[in-house]
Amino acid sequence: MEVKMEMAEKKELSVIACRVRMGAIEGIFHAKSGHPGGSLSIADTLTYLYFKEMNVDPKDPKMEDRDRFVLSKGHCAPALYAVLAEKGFFPTEELKKLRKVGAMLQGHPDMKGTPGVDMSTGSLGQGISAAVGMALSAKMFGKNYRVFAALGDGELQEGQVWEAAMLAGHYNLDNLIAVVDNNGLQIDGKCTDICSPEPITDKFAAFGWHVITIDGHDFDDIERAFNEARQVTNKPTAIIQKSVKGKYVSFMENNVAWHGAAPNAEQYEIAVNDLKAKLAELEA
């Protein structure tokens, strides 16, 4: 029988994820640039990772035995920053300084300047390769930490992704979990129109990965996937999450125009009101 998450815990995670979305929008609006669509589609999974799944400590960001997270789709840094702020790695006020000269939070993750960021990313395809290296290092040196990576579905068009996938399968990296944020859109339109990555599940399986498919906005599904991944041996795990780009902001949902654009003042107000309404619904 499938065990579902306790309602109180699901509610708490949903509320945090909504605040993460609000933080991402806040940062992008003040920066006047950024990538809201994919930040909103990955927010639930990032929340689950940092608030339930991963062994991390905001008071000791470089803890040697911590789990590692690599945002391979580095342009969605606003969501990562928002979840790190919610977790306590740095004050939420930093989010308003996104992309400002001299500020902590760069347009893409910077491991040297931001507490909680384990790998600098931005050039698509390179993050998953770094994650494979981290997982392989853990195996070689007898460490127990796990490595998590988040990729975009458009990112799967990069050949380097599949070189990394092949290596991870070859070395049986069961301490590696990759999440593919399958929201169906990339900067120029629908992934299937530009250069279809499908069938994603079959491709990862062909490289020796254990593959799980989920609804990326259902915390029961998210929990099921990560619990299943914990039980996998001798294989890396790929979690393919079906998601909605721009989730919970009315004019951004499934709209490719919001891949990499910042809202103006009027749009920002609508986005904030949408998320406040969702937050009120969750907290009722």
Image: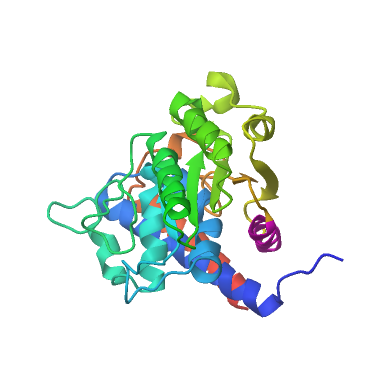
Image quadrant in which the C terminus is located: bottom right
Q: Residue at the far left: name it.
A: 102
Image quadrant in which the N terminus is located: bottom right
The secondary structure that most of the magenta stretch takes on is helix
Is residue 270 in view?
A: no
Q: Residue at x 33, y 47 (%)?
A: 264
x, y percentage for residue 87? Answer: 41, 72
The image quadrant that residue 258 belongs to is top left
Q: Residue at x 70, y 45 (%)?
A: 213
x, y percentage for residue 279? Answer: 54, 69
* Whether residue 23 is situated above or below residue 235 in the rendered picture: below
The image quadrant that residue 171 belongs to is top right
Q: Residue at the far top: name it.
A: 194
| Between 146 and 29, the one nearer to me in the picture | 146
* Whether residue 14 is situated above or below residue 125 in the rendered picture: below
Q: What's the magenta region?
A: 219-231
Is 200 left, or right, of 138 in this rendering?
right
x, y percentage for residue 187? Answer: 44, 30
* Whether residue 163 is situated above or below residue 15 in the rendered picture: above
Q: Residue at x 66, y 30 (%)?
A: 206
x, y percentage for residue 220? Answer: 70, 63
